[in-house]
């Protein structure tokens, strides 16, 4: 392999860049808004809305295939994310910082979701041999996880130190966000040089022009949605802009979505996707506000930099270890046998937060141990959810091998994001009225919906055993 095509030159930075904006939008934004005095009701409601681009990204994923190359989309989204994060910084000193910063965070979320689509498609094109793709799966996951530690851990820590020294958290977060935005722009410039230029990385329209009159051409590249689009446009006669090509592309895309909703026992599948993390979705919106609120308000009274260490570093490392062991456990016993033990591991450790709210320990070591237990259980239990999505995507309505695996997996991830978005939206309102300890008790009660979904769903007894399980994302 020539140095110019060495995957180590671009895969680590590509997936680190994929993870960092995601964690800034989903998790770090809650810390920032808490530092800036926003109420828990508003934090949970508005930051939950930021999941929306990941919920609906399957709807525009065919456009990434149809218009431009994956490389162009990756670079454009990295520059857009960098500029948008810097713009968040410039909104913070203003009187309407909440509205304007949320608008910029939504733009970051949209760009990040689009970057996910393009980067995963480019990964398959940049590593055309399936053996190479499999070899670098762990590298992808590792650098995505390192981005989580960098965001939830290092950047939160730096913002906390700067805010404590200056007494101005708006200035501290603006500094961090400008630096991060500049960093993403620089990474985009690096990738403009480092990313390879695969011969197959062309838009569906370009493939349609070159492959006109060759049925099936273009169906081997990109994601499953892209495969369907490439197949449809490749088989259309005439130019890519012809009405026949447009109708063929639209019909093929609609068929990919329709095939998903023809799956057997769809309601059981959707119930599981939406309810398995029903309790966890509410808990996650309030963890960092709980840690930052003073003891008089029922919180733990931690400094922002302490949250970066306890939750952003210890917690993420425990989450990662739990996910790795969860995947190994499923590969040994299969998803059907693993589901209930893993559902228990996901939900029972929520009792840790009931204890923390009642005891309010002052020891960072003790607090870190509690967070480590909860996050390990979350990572371990969440692996079952990821493998379940693989199972759903792997077969079509007749139980045969599914030609649209990746597209249907993307639809599953959309429902996964919806399952986090909807319960999270009301969680802050509920906590503001109950207080922290009763709210965490409610979270434990809400786990029964997760168990009900596990009881209702049907699992292929052969699936998962000796399969390569994905880690939580």
Image (cartoon, rainbow, N blue to C red):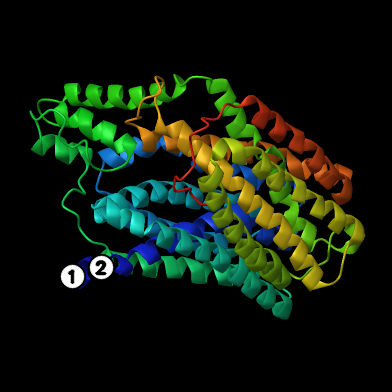
Q: Residues within 10 Å of mark 2 (few under 14, many from 20)?
A: some
SS category of the residue bearing label 2:
loop
Residue 70 lies, in percent from the top left, at: 28, 50
Image x and y of residue 168, in percent: 70, 72
Taking 184 as reference, is 391 above or below it?
Answer: above
Q: Is residue 255 above or below residue 122?
A: above
Q: Which residue is mark 2?
A: 6
Disc 1: which residue: 2
How many neighbours does mark 1 have within 10 angstroms: few (below 14), some (14-19), or many (20 or more)? few
Circle 1 SS class:
loop
At x 55%, y 49%, the residue is 103
| Residue lying at the far bottom of the rendered structure | 165
Location of residue 228 by image quarter: top left
Name which residue lies at 66% across and 57% down. 376
**Image quarter hosting the N terminus:** bottom left
Judged left or right of residue 47, residue 146 is: left
List x then y, in percent, for residue 58: 42, 36
In screen coordinates, is 246 left or right of 437?
left
Q: Image quadrant of residue 317? A: bottom right
2 and 1 marks in contact (CB < 8 Å): yes
| On screen, residue 467 above or below 181 | above
Task: Pick the residue in front: 163 or 136.
Answer: 136
Instruction: In this rendered view, identify the residue nearer to me: 17 or 336.
Output: 336
User: Residue 316 lies in what quarter of the image?
Assistant: bottom right
Q: Is residue 306 above or below residue 386?
A: below
Relative side of 88 to 120, left or right: right
**Residue at the (47%, 31%) spot, across then down:** 392
Q: Nearer the viewer, residue 410 or 169?
A: 410
Coordinates of residue 282 in the picture (x, y in percent): 72, 43
Is residue 390 visible in this depiction of the protein? yes
């Amino acid at each position: 392999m020539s140095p110019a095509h060495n995957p180590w030159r671009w895969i680590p930075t590509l997936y680190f860049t994929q993870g960092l904006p995601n964690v800034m939008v989903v998790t770090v934004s809650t810390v920032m808004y808490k530092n800036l005095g926003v109420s828990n009701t508003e934090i949970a409601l508005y930051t939950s809305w930021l999941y929306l681009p990941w919920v609906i990204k399957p709807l525009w994923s065919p456009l990434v295939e149809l218009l431009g190359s994956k490389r162009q989309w990756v670079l454009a989204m990295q520059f857009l994310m960098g500029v948008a994060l810097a713009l968040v910084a410039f909104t913070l000193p203003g009187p309407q910082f909440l509205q304007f910063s949320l608008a910029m965070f939504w733009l970051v979320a949209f760009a990040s979701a689009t970057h996910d689509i393009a980067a995963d498609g480019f990964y398959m094109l940049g590593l055309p041999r399936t053996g190479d793709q499999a070899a670098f799966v762990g590298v992808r996951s590792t650098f995505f996880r390192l981005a989580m530690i960098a965001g939830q851990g290092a950047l939160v820590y730096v913002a906390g130190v700067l805010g404590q020294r200056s007494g101005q958290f708006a200035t501290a977060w603006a500094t961090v966000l400008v630096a991060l935005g500049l960093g993403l722009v620089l990474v985009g410039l690096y990738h403009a040089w480092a990313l390879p230029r695969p011969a197959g990385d062309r838009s569906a329209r370009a493939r349609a022009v070159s492959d006109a009159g060759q049925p099936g051409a273009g169906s081997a590249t990109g994601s499953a949605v892209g495969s369907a689009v490439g197949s449809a446009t490749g088989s259309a006669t005439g130019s890519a802009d012809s009405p026949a090509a447009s109708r063929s592309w639209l019909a093929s895309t609609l068929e990919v979505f329709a095939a998903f909703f023809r799956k057997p026992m769809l309601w059981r599948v959707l119930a599981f996707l939406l309810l398995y993390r029903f309790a966890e979705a509410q808990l996650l919106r309030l963890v960092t506000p709980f840690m930052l609120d003073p003891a008089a308000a029922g919180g733990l009274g931690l400094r922002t930099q302490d949250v970066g260490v306890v939750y952003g570093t210890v917690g993420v490392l425990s989450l990662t270890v739990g996910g790795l062991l969860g995947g190994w456990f499923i590969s040994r016993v299969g998803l059907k046998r693993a589901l209930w033990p893993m559902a228990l591991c996901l939900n029972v450790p929520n009792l840790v937060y009931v204890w923390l709210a009642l005891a309010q320990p002052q020891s960072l070591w003790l607090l870190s141990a509690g967070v480590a237990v909860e996050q390990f259980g979350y990572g371990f239990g969440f692996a079952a959810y990821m493998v379940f999505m693989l199972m759903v995507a792997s077969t079509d309505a007749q139980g045969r091998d599914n030609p649209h695996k990746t597209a249907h997996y993307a639809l599953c991830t959309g429902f996964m994001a919806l399952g986090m978005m909807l319960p999270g939206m009301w969680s802050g309102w509920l906590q503001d009225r109950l207080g922290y300890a009763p709210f965490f008790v409610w979270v434990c009660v809400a786990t029964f919906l997760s168990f009900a979904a596990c009881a209702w769903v049907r699992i292929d007894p052969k699936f998962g055993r000796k399969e390569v399980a994905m880690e939580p994302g």
